[in-house]
Image (tube, rainbow, N blue to C red):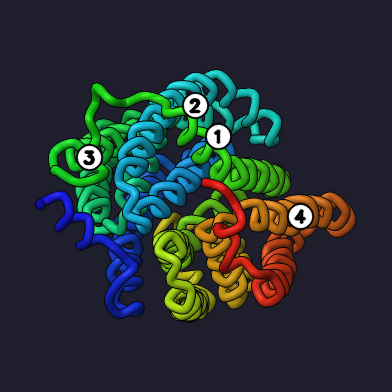
Amino acid sequence: MESKAISEQHSLTEGPIWKGLLKFALPIFFGGVFQQLYNTADSIIVGNFLGKEQLAAVSSSGSLIFLLVGFFTGIAVGAGVVISRYFGARDYENVHKAVHTTIAFGIAAGIILTIAGVLLTPQILTWMGTPQDVLPNSVSYFRMYFAGALAVVMYNICGGILQAVGDSRHPLYYLIISSVLNVLLDLLFVGVFRWGVWAAALATTISQFVSVALCLARLMRYDTVYRLFPKKIRFHGNLLKQVIRFGIPSGVQNSVIAFANVIVQSQINRFSADAMAACGSYAKLEGYVFLPITAFTLALTTFVGQNLGAKQYDRTKKGVKFGISCSVIMAELIGVVLFFCAPYLIRLFTDDANVIAIGARQARIESLFFFLLAFSHCIAGIMRGAGKPTVPMVIMLVAWCVIRVSYLWVMVPRFLKIEVVFSAYPLTWSISSIAFLIYFLKSDWLHAYDRMKL
């Protein structure tokens, strides 16, 4: 009886749509706030205690980390789609098999990523054109970060399982705990012990392992239809095929877009350590824009997956409209704040006037176009939940990879201004939004699952 009660509590197929989506999205949003706070804390503590060269080493981390982690987080999204579909259809036997298959995949992927990250970091940073005065610190930071890559993958996997069944509340609790721990360890390792930039990555690694342990304890402790039994962790062939089928497009999309962003970062690296520090600091601020986008994208993917599994088509359409509206409005409001407050916010990371000026210019060029970024991500999440992961993969690869990189290769050497790099983002967000809107209005995505075998 307890298993059924807990399962029904997390279902998004019943009750008021707005309440269900907000109840699911808000914990993800607040969890993202805490996660972004400790990411920001890394840069603030390093920048203020160790200097702008070390800040540049940490601040350039996002694109490289996502390059190596993005593929596996995409697979985790595919696993969540499979689990949410079976959960919505109340096929609890396959929910059980999918959970254990996903955990097995996460363990294998985490080990592979750890080895690849530690071994490949120096070469990738060299390919990115990382300045020689920044390179040693960057290598030490990234190698320590990827030593904990297993925790990164497993948190995405375990959190994805909980979110797929409608439980976004407990991942929030675990993020709060790990975020507070990360900041305290940052202050201890960097501020007190002065161990160097690698210690900021060590603090992150420790906090991520704590959050994974809490997630695993939640999955193993309670008698739910998605309960994890360590002895039953293995690959179920049919379920693994489905996870890969829905996850590979997202994984490929993440990796190739991340590769494009690595190229963007290499263009930024051409403009000096000041530009690296400025753009990295701005990226930390921009991360707050992604909070409502990520929250409602994941909410829409789960909502669409569960409701199409239950064949509730009208409910699906209403939920989609509400989720897109919330994400677009919230992202744009944050963008407006960032547009006006960027110089003061970037000053939190450093008091270097040139770094602040470059970061403020980036904010002024990009921040008022965040509604386009939100719209593209929401439609992509809807398509994944509807069993059409190839659609967002193709659109984003063309717009955010091929067009973005081509634009930079042509325009940066011609003008040699960093503003050209910044303008690539709103340009490609516009192109992807137009493509997504046309597909969303013209295609029969709502009945995609009815035409395929699970």
Q: Is residue 347 visible?
A: no
Residue matched to label 1 = 68
Label 1: element kind: helix
Comes first in the chain, label 2 or label 3: 2
Comes first in the chain, label 4 or label 2: 2
Q: Of the residues shown, which amino acid type is indicated by label 1?
A: Leu
Label 2: element kind: helix
Quarter of the figure with residue 355: bottom right
Q: In the image, which disc is placed on residue 227?
A: 3
Q: In the image, which disc is placed on residue 398?
A: 4
Contact between marks 2 and 3 (CB within 8 A): the answer is: no
* CA distance for labels 2 and 3: 26 Å
Which label lies toward us, 2 or 3?
3
- What x and y, as percent, mark residue 334? 46, 75
Q: Of the residues shown, which amino acid type is indicated by label 2?
A: Leu
Q: Residue at x 34, y 53 (%)?
A: 87
* CA distance for labels 3 and 4: 40 Å
Label 4: element kind: helix
Q: Of the residues shown, which amino acid type is indicated by label 3?
A: Arg
Comes first in the chain, label 3 or label 4: 3
Residue matched to label 2 = 113
Q: Residues within 10 Å of mark 4 (few under 14, many from 20)?
A: some
Residue 219, placed above or below residue 357: above
Residue 408, placed above or below residue 377: above
Residue 300, placed above or below residue 233: below
